[in-house]
Image (cartoon, grey):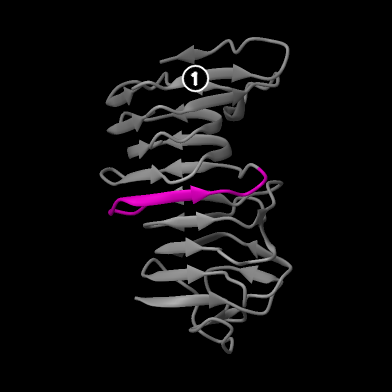
Amino acid sequence: MANRYWVGGTGTWDSSSTTNWASVSGGAPGASAPNILDDVFIDANSGGGVITVSGVVLCLSLNTTGFAGSIAGVGGSAIYIYTNIILNCGFNTVNGPQIIFSGTDNGTCSITTTVAIVGVIKDNSAAEVSLTSDLVCSYLHSIRGGFDLNDYNVTGGFYTSTTNTRRLFLGSGTWSIPYTGSSGDEGQWNADASTNLTINPQTSTISLIGGGSAITHITI
């Protein structure tokens, strides 16, 4: 287990390149690319510019506090998170990357970017992820395990698939679905795959907003 710090500003984050990784904040590049045992920091000493995620990259946790640049992706790119994420820098949603929670330990999710990230995916059979901020995303996809809104608000679509055990705790916040005429995941509340799915509504509100038409597919 180690810490990895992005340095050098604009560059490509992939599974092997050592060009932009250091073992200390603002240090010399050449450290190994992070893996599922490493905490990743993209901070005030990382430089500006755009970090482009290419392919699938892994990290134990990700913290972008202090970073003045932005994160982008190429088609199909994804960041796999195994515990916690703090994402509060610019984020390019044209091509991704998706944020995928895949750890066996419970984690937290704080995503406060000013634009919607492409997708948040919960994919683990046991662990639970809890929000620690409001979340704006294109969609939240529940595949396995638990997701707790923790009384925060969500803007984006929801869908779930498979018959894996899944748990969704809505708390006291509002889930707003910005329907704009699209039949894609960003414009639906789709819980058709209800086998082994538990939704605890608590005192939450689901709000259908945007567009001139009602959402035609809602199953809760």
Indicate the quadrant containing the N terminus: top left, top right, bottom left or bottom right: bottom left
Magenta stretch encompasses residue 98: no
Which of the 4 image quadrants contains residue 151?
A: top left
Q: What residue did someone put label 1 on?
A: 206
> In this picture, is 149 found above or below 36?
above
Q: Is residue 156 left or right of residue 149?
A: right
> In this picture, is 55 found above or below 28?
above
Q: Position of residue 125 (x, y in %)?
A: 28, 43
User: What residue is rendered at 55% in x and 64% in y?
Assistant: 65
Indicate the quadrant containing the C terminus: top left, top right, bottom left or bottom right: top left
Q: Residues within 10 Å of mark 1 (few under 14, many from 20)?
A: some
Instruction: Confirm whether residue 144 shows in the render.
Output: no
Amino acid under disc 1: Ile
User: What residue is rendered at 31% in x and 25% in y?
Assistant: 197
Q: Position of residue 146 (x, y in %)?
A: 32, 38
Of residues 70 and 52, the one nearer the viewer is 70
Toward the bottom, the furthest residue is 28
Q: Is residue 32 left or right of residue 143?
A: right
User: What residue is rendered at 60% in x and 67% in y?
Assistant: 66
Stretch in magenta: 102-115
Which of the 4 image quadrants contains residue 211?
A: top right
User: What residue is rendered at 51% in x and 70% in y?
Assistant: 41
Q: How many marks?
A: 1
> In this picture, is 214 found above or below 99?
above
| Mark 1 secondary-structure assignment | strand
Instruction: Confirm whether residue 39 shows in the render.
Output: yes
Q: Position of residue 89 (x, y in %)?
A: 63, 57
Of residues 88 and 18, the one nearer the viewer is 88
Which of the 4 image quadrants contains residue 19?
A: bottom right
Q: Position of residue 182 (x, y in %)?
A: 67, 22
- Chief secondary structure of the magenta span? loop
